[in-house]
Amino acid sequence: MKIAIIDCGTNTFNLLIRSQAENRTLFNTKIPVRLAEGAGEDLLISEAAQTRALDALAQHKQTALDWEVDALYAVATAAVRTAPNGTDLVQAAEKDLGIKINVIDGNTEAQLIYEGVKQGIEFKDAGSLIMDIGGGSTEFILLRDKKPVWQASFALGSSVMLNRFRPADPILPEEIEAIEDYLDEVLAPLKEAAGKEFPRVLIGSSGSFDTLAQMCAEIFRTSRFEEDETSYTFSMHEYMNVANRMLKSTFEERLNTPGMIPMRADMIVMACIEINYIIKRFGIRLLQQCNYALKEGLYYSLENDSEQWQKSSL
């Protein structure tokens, strides 16, 4: 049986096609949609963004049909669940394309991310913290003895933060300080929970960490980063070098950095500030990236309990 999963994120719509019989990924791709682009304080999805979203869904469905999948599932996260007109996109997707979008809350998103990450990386014995920076939200999952003991979702996605702070280019030191003060306030629940767990390993999933891993591998050429590998371990020195470079660079300079994914060139600044904050705040000693995240978590969830998810028409 072939399963197709569409993860409707704030920045990108991701497609995963896996074979249950062969227990392997057949195809994996993403289309940038930038649902939050043009959104004001009301968080409304613009007409242009909705058009991009529906076009991406149509392309992904056609790809799924070309692969002759047996089932298609779609989930949407922060941008759709928080937008007052998010239901308009959900209804249009079902009406025009036969795609039923499962809109999930932040807790479910965090749970699926954990389920995905644990398939792609071997957890260390030390206390660990999973961090997934999306466009609309950032999820954290604390691990003790390789098991989750606390999880939460915060409205700290890279697009949301970019819209909130609109920093100079390159970002100014006082702007970084203001963002860190904001993180200190918003992440109070994480600090309280993590203070009891003492995480020393940070595991990052999704686009920002993927981009940073690719840049580190291409700039330093000291560690392998292959598409068929499911995780990457950073040298902390190399990560900090690249992160500081991002914070001191203009948009054009970031865009021309080896390994940079073009659509990440503006958002990577906010991601680096968040990651640096976590590293400093909790004394992180090991930084890892995992290729698997929400969509892989949903795939494994479907194996155990497919009834809770709406299936789309093919």
Image: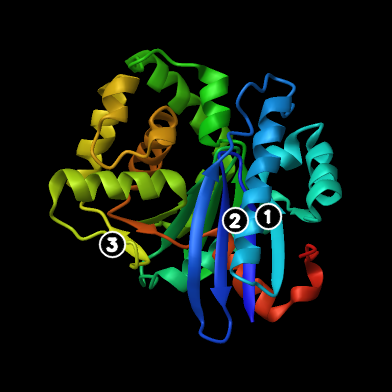
Which disc, if any, is residue 107?
1
Q: Quick one: label 1, few (<14), some, or many (20+) residues within 10 Å?
A: some
Q: Secondary structure at mark 2?
A: strand
- Residue 304 is left or right of residue 297, and the answer is right
In the picture of the structure, the residue carrying the numbered disc 2 is 151
Q: Is residue 298 visible?
A: no
Q: Quick one: label 2, few (<14), some, or many (20+) residues within 10 Å?
A: many
Placement of 132 over or under 268, stated as above or below: below
* Circles 1 and 2: CB atoms closer than 8 Å: yes
Q: Position of residue 136 (x, y in %)?
A: 60, 37
In space, the residues marked 1 and 3 are separated at their CA atoms by 31 Å
Q: Position of residue 297 (x, y in %)?
A: 58, 66
Quarter of the rendering containing residue 201: bottom left
In space, the residues marked 2 and 3 are separated at their CA atoms by 30 Å
Marks 1 and 2: which is nearer the front?
A: 1
Q: Secondary structure at mark 3?
A: loop
Q: Residue at x 51, y 60 (%)?
A: 293
Marks 2 and 3: which is nearer the front?
A: 3
In the picture of the structure, the residue carrying the numbered disc 3 is 226
Q: Position of residue 16 (x, y in %)?
A: 55, 63
